[in-house]
Image (tube, rainbow, N blue to C red):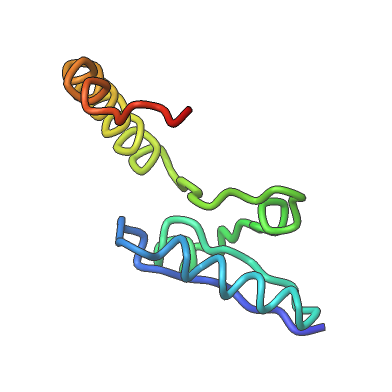
Amino acid sequence: MKRIGVLTSGGDAPGMNVAIRAVVRTGLAKGWDVLGVRHGYASLISGNLHSILQVVESANPPHHLLLGNDAYEAATAKLQNLHKEFSSWEAVSRGVDFPKAT
């Protein structure tokens, strides 16, 4: 069996989740063992590899997978700020609806 590892630099980068997901799904479709390397190059050097097969083999894998505390906290903070902004402009947002067709 072939085995491949997915390695990034370890920092946040737009579009990386989609790219990683595509690599993993392609590898699995070919029957390969696919491993994710957590914490970038430092993990590769230390040999601390983490399998991400559980995610991609899931019946409903996430479209956005947040890996690590920093990514999770940044995304959560962004969502909270968006919710606060949406709430403060709710009346204006809802006030521009078109009348429902009868």
**How many numbered discs sit on the rendered protein?**
0
- Residue 20 at what x, y percent from top left? 51, 68
Q: Is residue 39 above or below residue 25?
A: above
Left/right of residue 82 with respect to residue 41 in the rendered view: left
The furthest residue to the front: 102
Residue at 53%, 71% (x, y): give it. 6
Residue at 58%, 48% (x, y): give it. 62
Of the pair 46 and 98, the residue shown nearer to us: 98
The answer to which image quadrant residue 100 occupies is top left
Of the pair 39 and 76, the residue shown nearer to us: 76
Q: Is residue 65 above or below residue 77?
A: below
Of the pair 19 and 91, the residue shown nearer to us: 91
Left/right of residue 73 with respect to residue 39 in the rendered view: left
- Residue 86 at what x, y percent from top left? 24, 24
Q: Quadrant of the N terminus?
A: bottom right
Q: Is residue 4 above or below residue 18?
A: below
Residue at 68%, 58% (x, y): give it. 56
- Residue 27 at what x, y percent from top left? 68, 78
Left/right of residue 10 with respect to residue 85 in the rendered view: right
Residue at 34%, 26% (x, y): give it. 99
Left/right of residue 75 with respect to residue 17 in the rendered view: left
Of the pair 38 and 27, the residue shown nearer to us: 27
Q: Is residue 32 above or below residue 16?
A: below
- Residue 66 at what x, y percent from top left? 46, 45
